[in-house]
Amino acid sequence: MEDSDGSGRWDGLCSRDANLREVALDGVRQLVLSLSEKAGPTNGKPPPPAPVHGPAAALRPADGLDHYLVRLLLLSRRCPFSDVRDKCGAILQAVQ
């Protein structure tokens, strides 16, 4: 099952079954590419900071593109499965 924060998308990457990892990576890849297309080109400029209103503003849901990119970067460097490291790096290259 998928949690409300999207953490369920990552569960398959921990599997010893290479086919399950492949399916999970494909789902993450499709989602990240979709989010990056919605975000549009940045032309090398960082996005403007989001307005902050009160302490609850810091508790935004972690479902944005940045959240996925950070996880992909960590997995591309530290995952014990080489296929996951390689494919996470490829996803990051595709987004770049």
Image (cartoon, rainbow, N blue to C red):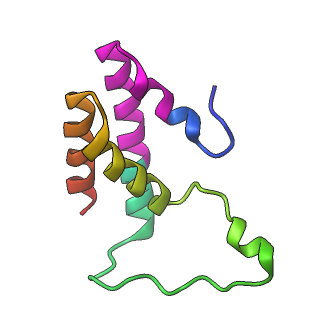
**Quarter of the view holding residue 19:** top left
Q: Position of residue 61 (x, y in %)?
A: 66, 58
Q: Is residue 57 left or right of residue 66?
A: right
| Magenta-colored span | 10-31
The percent position of residue 72, horizontal first and vertical second, equals 35, 48
Residue 15 sits in quarter: top left
Name the image quarter holding the N terminus: top right
Please check the rendered image and state whether residue 12 is part of the magenta-colored stretch, yes or no: yes
Residue in the picture at 35% in, 49% down: 74
- Above or below 31: residue 19: above
Residue appearing at x 60%, y 56% in the figure: 62
Q: Could you say which is closer to the camera, residue 41 or residue 7?
A: 7
Q: Residue at x 34, y 12 (%)?
A: 17
Q: Magenta span has 32?
A: no
Q: State left or right for residue 22 relative to residue 59.
A: left
In this picture, is 16 found above or below 95? Answer: above
At 27% from the left and 33% from the top, the residue drawn is 84
84 w.r.t. 20: above or below: below
| Prevalent SS, magenta region | helix
Give 11 or 41, whichever is nearer the viewer: 11
Quarter that holds the C terminus: bottom left
